[in-house]
Amino acid sequence: MCLHQPPCPAANTPERDTAHIVASHPEQGWSLLCNGIVRFEDTGELLPDGRTVAPCRTAGAAA
């Protein structure tokens, strides 16, 4: 799916978040990355295979 050079990291790699944004919808709080991941503004992710990645929350966010 990726035509960038060098290619964007695959969705199953640790550096998957560095893929290029191909569609951005900040008013709805999400972006589609070149590798098929939907990234949400709360740092949660929906992977192309349907799995989810929980948002990364810090201790300071709860305060």
Image (cartoon, rainbow, N blue to C red):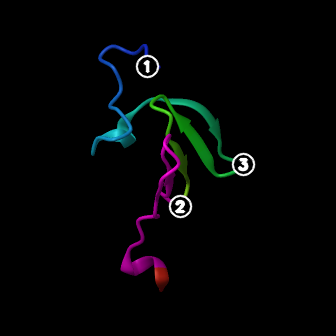
Mark 2 / mark 3, whichever is N-terminal:
3
* Main SS category, magenta section: loop
Q: Is residue 25 left or right of residue 8?
A: right
Question: Tag 1, which secondary structure?
Answer: loop
Q: Amino acid at mark 2?
A: Asp
Q: Is residue 37 left or right of residue 13?
A: right
Could you tell me how far apart the alpha carbons at marks 1 and 2 are, in whole angstroms?
25 Å
Q: Amino acid at mark 3?
A: Glu
Point out residue 39 in the picture as x, y percentages from the top left corner.
52, 47
Question: Tag 3, which secondary structure?
Answer: loop
Could you tell me how far apart the alpha carbons at marks 2 and 3 are, in whole angstroms?
13 Å
User: Residue under circle 3?
Assistant: 27
Query: Which label sits on residue 2?
Result: 1
Point out residue 31 in the picture as x, y percentages from the top left corner.
58, 41
Query: Which label sits on residue 48?
Result: none
Mark 1 / mark 3, whichever is N-terminal:
1
Question: Tag 2, which secondary structure?
Answer: loop
